[in-house]
Amino acid sequence: AKREARGHALVFSERHADELSRVRRMEHALHTADLEQEIYILFQPQFDIALNRTTGYEVLARWRSPTLGEVSPGEFIPLAERTGMISKITQTVLRKALAMTETLPRPLRLSVNLSAHDLGSTTAMEAIATLVEQAGRPCRVDFEITETAVMRDIGQANEGLLALLALGSRIALDDFGTGHSSLTHVQKLPLDRIKVDRSFVNEVTSDPTSRAIIKTTVDLCRNLGISCVFEGIETEEQLDALLGLGGTVMQGYLFGRPMSADKVLEHIADENQG
Ligand code: C2E
Ligand code: CA
Ligand code: CA
Ligand code: CA
């Protein structure tokens, strides 16, 4: 038994060491990355039920490292957050998104994710505002923020967001329901939409509590005169349940997976054909 335990310990420490070295390699690769070259963006449709058409796309970052290959955002975004690299990534993503609006037919809009690091830094928020401003009017890029991202200093986050609002961007509160003291954030932030987290959408057909939370959020949005977005819709059953609860904007694999710029143009053409 003793020998076995030692065996396990060995396996464990090897695996642990492997993981550590992967993180270290990733950290190094990210630090030395040519972001303009290695970071690219995909677009996921956001479909408006009342208008019966796609009104915009969420912009999702991807990293293709020459040494590590494709790294998922679930891995490199948290790492970039920890090392502060995220603000450079945000700006790269935003530049690419702004360039995309040149070929994206009007009035379609793009929605870019901001990180805690961006929202907590005056310099980063100013750089973001400058990029938006330089792209000219009308502004067609919106932003998504999370509750955890604004938690540290809501006053400071607000300042940066109001500057973006003044340029014509809209602000969505992402992953709603998973953070802390959500209602305080709704009260204090200049929001245009709330995105109900995928975890509730997932359970809408099976869990009465998720359904009740969604219903309450839809009502809240209606009373505030802002739109309610559902993310992560995968099945017709989920969609039916959400339609019954009165949602307005739908996002998820059922409406379209994150796609390349070429595919976006095809997607728009398909939709226009009916
Ligand atoms: P998020 O902002 O909540 O983005 C939605 C995620 O859900 C995306 O994962 C999207 O591909 C995925 N998704 C969409 N529809 C479905 C569905 O029907 N089913 C399932 N299972 N998943 C769906 P992705 O692209 O892997 O991104 C993961 C997270 O990484 C994002 O979550 C966001 O927090 C972060 N992220 C991605 N791009 C950026 C970025 O440019 N900047 C920042 N700060 N964060 C980003
Ligand atoms: Ca998002
Ligand atoms: Ca989300
Ligand atoms: Ca989410």
Image (spheres, helix red, strand yellow):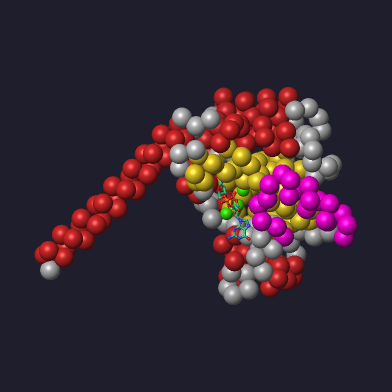
- Residue 249 in percent (x, y) is at 74, 56
What is the magenta range?
Answer: 255-274
Give the residue displayed 60% in from the left and 54% down from the top.
Answer: 176
- Residue 171 in percent (x, y) is at 68, 42
Is 266 rendered above or below residue 88? below
Disc tally is 0
Q: Is residue 173 left or right of residue 121?
A: right
Query: Residue 89's image quarter?
Result: top right
- Residue 24 in percent (x, y) is at 36, 39
Give the residue displayed 80% in from the left and 60% down from the top.
Answer: 49
State which quarter of the image contains the N terminus.
Answer: bottom left
Query: Residue 250's image quarter?
Result: bottom right
Q: Is residue 216 visible?
A: no
State which quarter of the image contains the C terminus.
Answer: bottom right
Of all residues, the one furthest to the left in this rendering is: 2
Which of these two is toward me, 173 or 95?
Answer: 95
Give the residue displayed 32% in from the left and 48% down from the top.
Answer: 18
Dominant SS in magenta: helix
Q: Is residue 272 visible?
A: yes
Magenta run includes residue 100? no
Give the residue displayed 57% in from the left and 44% down from the top.
Answer: 62
Which of these two is toward me, 134 or 246?
Answer: 134
Which of these two is toward me, 239 or 156?
Answer: 239
Is 243 rendered above or below residue 153? below
Is 51 rendered above or below residue 212? above
Of all residues, the one furthest to the front in this rendering is: 66
